[in-house]
Image (cartoon, rainbow, N blue to C red):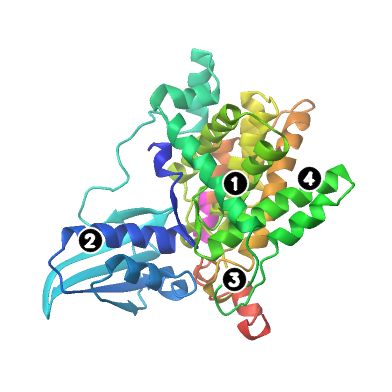
Amino acid sequence: MKSLKELFRIGPGPSSSHTLGPQRAAKLFKEANPQAKRYQADLFGSLALTGKGHMSDMIIEQTFAPIPCEIHFKSGDNLKYPNTLVLSAYDDEKLLDSWTVYSIGGGAILIEGKAAEEGKEVYPHESMKEISEYCKEEQIALWQYVDRFEDIDDYLNDILLQMCRTVDNGLNTKGVLPGKLKLERIARGLLDKANVCENPMEKEKLLLSAYAYSASEENAAGGITVTAPTLGSSGVLPALVYYYYYDRKLQREELIKGLKIAGLVGNLIKHNATISGAQGGCQAEIGAACAMGAAMVAYLRGLNQHQIEYAAEMGIEHHLGLTCDPVGGYVMIPCIERNAVAALRAMDAAVLAEFISKVKQNRVSFDMIVNTMNYTGKKLPMELRETSLGGLATIVPLESC
């Protein structure tokens, strides 16, 4: 498996596959063709269908600037990956170069005919079962497993700080999110409600929801946030990190250990299935984020390795079949609210894993549920995989928003 640096990335919203991936592709293509007088970007599949709402055209034009770039949204059948773009460089009318690029989720890209941009393999094991057996044999914890294969503390410290910065920015910003939905930011309002709430359980839920809304609203506005594992699901883990850091007063070192475990869970999902909504539906984004969050919370609660795996498995299992059907192609409805719900579910999954594991043995392993999610994602119709051609995207008319 790849480095956790390939999973946790800092970049502009609102979509890792629609903005961060195309941004990386355009930057590399521009560096390879500096003599071009104009560029062209042809977007296919989900990039074509929801690219406008996800600001794909805007990020590509900004990256190629000051050289002009012409954007075309095209239909395409039998695509190798649902997020496909073709970049072309011209000297007047003469074609200089052309790349076919696949945005495969979480900001990762593949360029047809070129070496993968993802970097070298870092982790020798490919399943939770293999990792668990290795940890048992070596008598180490899951976070120590990460330390065995890469030195990532400084990088994850930067990730943690950016997560907190994103939440802070969202909490201190009011107004309407960009786009036709005219959606009002409500994170600050939720925080105000939490601060006067006298019921401790309700207060915790309101705080987590406010933080998840905050990070997700920042992402939807094109702000800087962290893929965790994607930008569409970038409200879940930051909400939990912010809560444990500022409200529960946990040390940063402990939270970094938690991020290592969350990253390991996300890496396994990415390696053995997908974290792309265009490939696997929202179960691959929110389900993965919930699993990552549940694993981190389980660790922070002092649970053992089996219970951490159980919490992560639960996070995916109860998101199976979740569709990706953003209204208007924006990462807003149902995406923002969905992040808050998943943050709460992550907490619940960790609690349930702790106590259910004391009365019965879990029969569904983490590896089993990842394989099931991958299978389920492939069975979802194309209309429900980030195309805005079905589900809420067609039932909720733009005019009513």
| Distance between mark 3 and mark 2 Cα atoms | 31 Å
Left or right of 321 on screen, residue 195: right
Residue 281 in the image: state x and y as whole percent. 54, 60
The residue tagged 4 is: 204
Residue 134 in the image: state x and y as whole percent. 48, 20
The kind of residue tagged 3 is Leu
| Distance between mark 3 and mark 1 Cα atoms | 20 Å
> Could you tell me if residue 371 is visible in this image?
no
Disc on the earlier residue, 2 or 1: 2
The kind of residue tagged 1 is Pro
The numbered mark at residue 238 is 1
Residue contact between numbered discs 1 and 4, judged by CB atoms under 8 Å: no
Q: Secondary structure at mark 4?
A: helix
> Could you tell me if residue 213 is visible in this image?
yes
Disc on the earlier residue, 1 or 4: 4
| Distance between mark 4 and mark 2 Cα atoms | 46 Å
The kind of residue tagged 4 is Glu
The residue tagged 3 is: 177
Disc on the earlier residue, 3 or 4: 3
Q: Nearer the viewer, residue 156 or 370?
A: 156
Q: Secondary structure at mark 2?
A: helix
Dominant SS type (magenta): helix
Q: Residue at x 63, y 26 (%)?
A: 306
Q: Quadrant of residue 204?
A: top right
Disc on the earlier residue, 3 or 1: 3
